[in-house]
Each structure stands twice: as structure tokens, then as C-alpha cells.
Image (cartoon, rainbow, N blue to C red):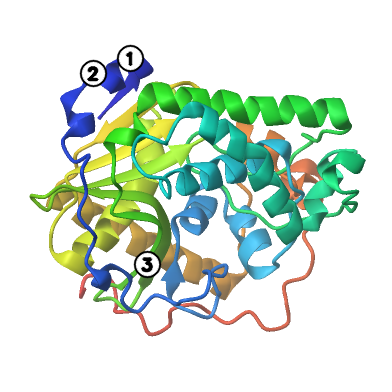
């Protein structure tokens, strides 16, 4: 596993060995819901990378998001990430040769408008003027966390005013500029984009998630790609950043019986690429870790012991006022908080 600069990413042959893709077999999404995935239900034996990351970061954060379902304030950075992801997804709707930086930059404001229509509360991030159709609103919006280069919560980051909006849109253009340094999308034909994947382990635990992009070579080798709009992690933190990708690789391996050739994180905030080549031993270890994590979630649900885990990430958490580590008091647990996964296979028998 290594972090590379944008220049190295463009010249490393590994980055192009699965560029021309064949369609992924339809069984990748077998059993997955056709509707957008909803947050993890406590009563179901299911786990996503974001919710697993929440519990590993702070059990109390997991409780606030999953059990209490407390809202989170939208932030400019997280919203920009959503817009940039949408642009990169739609960019590949265009034929090769038309996927230019100018075209991608021109998509930013329409994608922002599309997002505003779907989530009007995001207008509260900026003092939106008449040029944006007078959309008004505010309040909280739900959201997820990113592992490695992303946000844990809303924190104090907010914006306001048309000047800030213009700067925010320009910053999205800057992220796209870095993307075009890291990759030439005209050389790629992704097999899948924003792909919902799901599998049930022998233990009964369901793993699910949404993969930004899958590239499949004619040989059948698979590259799993995820876009991050933050900066690459520093030395010593790469493994944590790659956890999400191992999670996806485990699902794909269980579905197809073949380990993905390459896991690749593109950090648009710093223009770096993090790559990892997994093997079966890695993915078996990931499965054991997830089962242990789920049992820890079960124990916390049984005992009500959702203790906080203070760290530097607390600076970005929306829930400080409710956190005992900051002198707060969590709300009472919901009246019905079923224990997840009572039917899971006992440890050591899966």
C-alpha cells in the first residue's frame, strides 16, 4: 500500500491495467434493494462501512446516529463532496473524448441545483440570492461519515452569502482539476458507478454498501475505486483509510469468489492516490474484524453502555452538547431498542 502524488498516479502502469471495462455480472447486486439504501436498522443484522466506522471512532457516535437517529447539520465540505461525486458519476455518461475538465466544471452548478431541489434545507448553508431561484430554507440534514479524508460531523463549519457560494463552487472546480491530473476519464470505461452491493456472511451478518466505481478488465480483474474530496491520510493512518475498501472487497469476493485485483482511493483534496492489493488472508481478517465489531455493537445494545471515545475528531462532531466527555448528557434511549443480531452464529463457529 502506498500514497502517490498525482504525477506518479498518472505514470504508474497499475493505474491503467484495468482501464477498459466489461460489464459487471448482474449478481453483484443480487438481493440488494432497488430503492436507495437506508441507514442501518438496529434490529437487523446489517452493517455498512460508514456505520462500522462510526462505532470504531466512537460507540456513542454510533448510538446517536443509528439508535437515536439524531440529525446532523449539513456542511459546505460534505455537500461539496456530494456534488463532486455526482459530477464524476455523470461525466461517464458522455462518450470518450467529451469527458473534459471544462465539461465537468460546467456540471457543478447544475448538480448543486439538482441537490438543492432534492434537499432544500441545504440552502441554509448560503444566503442564496435570486440567481438561484430564490430557494430558501435551513435546518438540519442527515449525513454519513467518511473514513479517511472525510468528515465525522458538522462541527462549527458553516458558510453564508453569495460570495461564499461563489468561492464554494470554485473550490469544487479545484477538486475536479485534481481529478483530471490523477486520471484521464477518456481512457476509462467503468463497468459500474454508484453500485449497491450486498452479501450475507455465513454468520448471518449482512454487509452492504455503495461503491463509487468498478473497473473490470477483459481478463476479469476488478479494480474498486472510491473518490475522496478530503486529503490523503498521513503516514501510519493508511490502513484505517483502506478499511472501507476492504469492506467492499470482502462483499465482492463473497459474491463472485474472486478477490479484487486492486483497491484505489483517489484523494482530490491533496491530489494523491492510495492503492492496495488485497488477498484472501486480508479479506478473511476483515471478516473476523467485522464479526467482532458487530458483537461489540450487540453488547453495547444489551448493556446500554455507549461510552464516548474522545479524539481530535470531536472538534467536528455535531453532538458535543450531548456528550459526557464535554459535560453533556445523552438523551434517554428510545423505548424500543431491539438487540441486533441475536441469531448470529456464535463466535468461532462461522
Q: Secondary structure at mark 1?
A: helix
Q: CA distance from mark 3 to mark 2?
A: 35 Å
Is residue 176 found left or right of 284 in the rendered image? right
Q: Which of these two is toward me, 205 or 333?
A: 205
Report crowding for label 1: few under 14, some 14 to 19, many 20 or more residues within 10 A (C-alpha).
some
- Are dots 1 and 3 in contact, CB under 8 Å? no
Asked whether residue 230 appears in the rendered view, the answer is no
- Measured from the top left, where is residue 332 in percent x and y? 78, 70
Q: Which of these two is toward me, 114 or 301?
A: 114
Q: Which of these two is toward me, 172 or 225?
A: 172
Q: Secondary structure at mark 3?
A: strand
Camera-side mark, 3 or 2: 2
Camera-side mark, 1 or 3: 1
In this figure, which residue is indicated by the disc labeled 1? 7
- Are dots 1 and 2 in contact, CB under 8 Å? yes
Q: Earlier in the sequence, mark 3 or mark 2?
A: 2
Report crowding for label 2: few under 14, some 14 to 19, many 20 or more residues within 10 A (C-alpha).
few
In this figure, which residue is indicated by the disc labeled 3? 207
Asked whether residue 319 appears in the rendered view, the answer is yes
In this figure, which residue is indicated by the disc labeled 2? 11
Report crowding for label 3: few under 14, some 14 to 19, many 20 or more residues within 10 A (C-alpha).
many
Q: Secondary structure at mark 2?
A: helix
- Are dots 3 and 2 in contact, CB under 8 Å? no
- Measured from the top left, where is residue 91 in percent x and y? 46, 43
Is residue 190 found left or right of 75 in the rendered image? left
In percent of the image, x 34 and y 47: which residue is there? 245
Amino acid at each position: 500500500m502506498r500514497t502517490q502524488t498525482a504525477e506518479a498516479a498518472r505514470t504508474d502502469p497499475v493505474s491503467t491495467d484495468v482501464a477498459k471495462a466489461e460489464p459487471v455480472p448482474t449478481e453483484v447486486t443480487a438481493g440488494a434493494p432497488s430503492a436507495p439504501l437506508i441507514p442501518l436498522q438496529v434490529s437487523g443484522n446489517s452493517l455498512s462501512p460508514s456505520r462500522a466506522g462510526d462505532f470504531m471512532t466512537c460507540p456513542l457516535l454510533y448510538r446517536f446516529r443509528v439508535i437515536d437517529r439524531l440529525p446532523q447539520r449539513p456542511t459546505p465540505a460534505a455537500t461539496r463532496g456530494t456534488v463532486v461525486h455526482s459530477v464524476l458519476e455523470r461525466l461517464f455518461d458522455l462518450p470518450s473524448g467529451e469527458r473534459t475538465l471544462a465539461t465537468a466544471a460546467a456540471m457543478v452548478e447544475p448538480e448543486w441545483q439538482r441537490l438543492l431541489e432534492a434537499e432544500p434545507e441545504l440552502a441554509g448553508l448560503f444566503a442564496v440570492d435570486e440567481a438561484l431561484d430564490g430557494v430558501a430554507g435551513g435546518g438540519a440534514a442527515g449525513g454519513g461519515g467518511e473514513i479517511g479524508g472525510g468528515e465525522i460531523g458538522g462541527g462549527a463549519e458553516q458558510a453564508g452569502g453569495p460570495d461564499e457560494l461563489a468561492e464554494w463552487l470554485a473550490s469544487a472546480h479545484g477538486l475536479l482539476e485534481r481529478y483530471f491530473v490523477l486520471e484521464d476519464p477518456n481512457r476509462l470505461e467503468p463497468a459500474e458507478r454508484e453500485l449497491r452491493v450486498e452479501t450475507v456472511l455465513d454468520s448471518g451478518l449482512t454487509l452492504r454498501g455503495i461503491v463509487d466505481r468498478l473497473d473490470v478488465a477483459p481478463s476479469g480483474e476488478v479494480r474498486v475505486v472510491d473518490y475522496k474530496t478530503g486529503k490523503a491520510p498521513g503516514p501510519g493512518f493508511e490502513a484505517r483509510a483502506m478499511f472501507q475498501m476492504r469492506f467492499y472487497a470482502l462483499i465482492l469476493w463473497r459474491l463472485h469468489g474472486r478477490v479484487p485485483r486492486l483497491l484505489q482511493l483517489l484523494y482530490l483534496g491533496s491530489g494523491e492516490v492510495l492503492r492496495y492489493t488485497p488477498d484472501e488472508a486480508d479479506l478473511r481478517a476483515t471478516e473476523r474484524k467485522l464479526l467482532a465489531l458487530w458483537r461489540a455493537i450487540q453488547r453495547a445494545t444489551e448493556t446500554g453502555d455507549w461510552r464516548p471515545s474522545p479524539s481530535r475528531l470531536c472538534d467536528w462532531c455535531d453532538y458535543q452538547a450531548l456528550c459526557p466527555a464535554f459535560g453533556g448528557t445523552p438523551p434517554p434511549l428510545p423505548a424500543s431498542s431491539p438487540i441486533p443480531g441475536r441469531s448470529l452464529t456464535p463466535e468461532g463457529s462461522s
